[in-house]
Amino acid sequence: MKRRRFRSTKSLFLGRYFPLSLPLSSAVGRAAMEKSREKQSAPAPVNLKPVEATPENFAEFGQVVEASPDGDEFGPQDAQLDLSRGIPRLYIMHIEKRPLKFKTITHHASVTQCLGSIGGGAWYLGVAKPSVLDATDHNEGDPSKRIVKSTIGHFYVPPRAEEVRIFKVTGSKFLKLNRGTWHAGPIFKEEAMDFYNLELSNTNVVDHTTHSFTEEDGVYFVIDD
């Protein structure tokens, strides 16, 4: 009768995590190398100072709309809206715990968007200029332009990390984002804030394209304020 051989608990443990055909020192060395590689590839923080949003410095991203006297007629100082591609939706968003950092940024290709805090509390928005391409102005897969086709169907150029800016909004004003403006936020220091939001009824379902800076660029942003 052959005797059954049992592996020790220690052998079973090592066999589970390291191939027994490898010397233990090699297995441990490989694990250490993998840990080191993971550490090296961890996203790096990019600290950015916010600037107070004004109609002048926010112009390439949208508009800063401030209070105007009752009775004023419509003009260029008012929000220039594009809500023609669906049913407009005006609602109040309740947002909790948005610390001063972000790793992704989003754009809406079919609509302008207006955001403002209820009560005028201070908040921040990370932005990059619009990069949605016209139907005839693209060459999918062109490595020189990094052109990407979104899951929605339009083409765009991903935002570059060095193009991201941080704006601070205080008081009774709101931001109108141009169609396609990349944005991250609202972000704030409070535990929770309420914001009014004007977009389309299905914007967050069918018109929500996101770029991940951690996955594509190896960085994330920290608002230094």
Image (tube, rainbow, N blue to C red):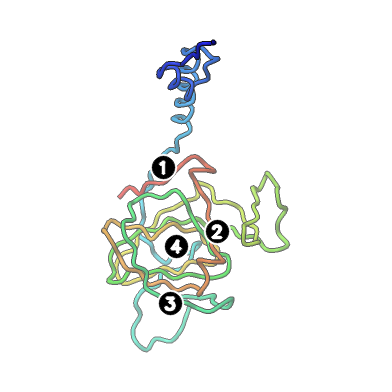
Q: Nearer the viewer, residue 4 or 47?
A: 4
- Residue that mark 4 sits on: 58
Image position, residue 93 (x, y; %):
37, 69
The numbered disc on residue 46 is: 1
- Alpha carbon distance from label 2 to label 4: 22 Å
State which mark lies toward you, 4 or 1: 1
State which mark lies toward you, 2 or 1: 2
- Mark 3 residue type: Leu
Using residue 145 as the reference point, say whether residue 95 is left or right of it: left
The numbered disc on residue 90 is: 3
- Mark 1 residue type: Val
| Residue 176 figure quarter | bottom left
- Alpha carbon distance from label 2 to label 3: 21 Å
The reply to whether dot 2 and dot 1 touch (C-beta < 8 Å) is no
Relative height, residue 43 to residue 11 (above, below) = below
Image position, residue 38 (x, y; %):
47, 31
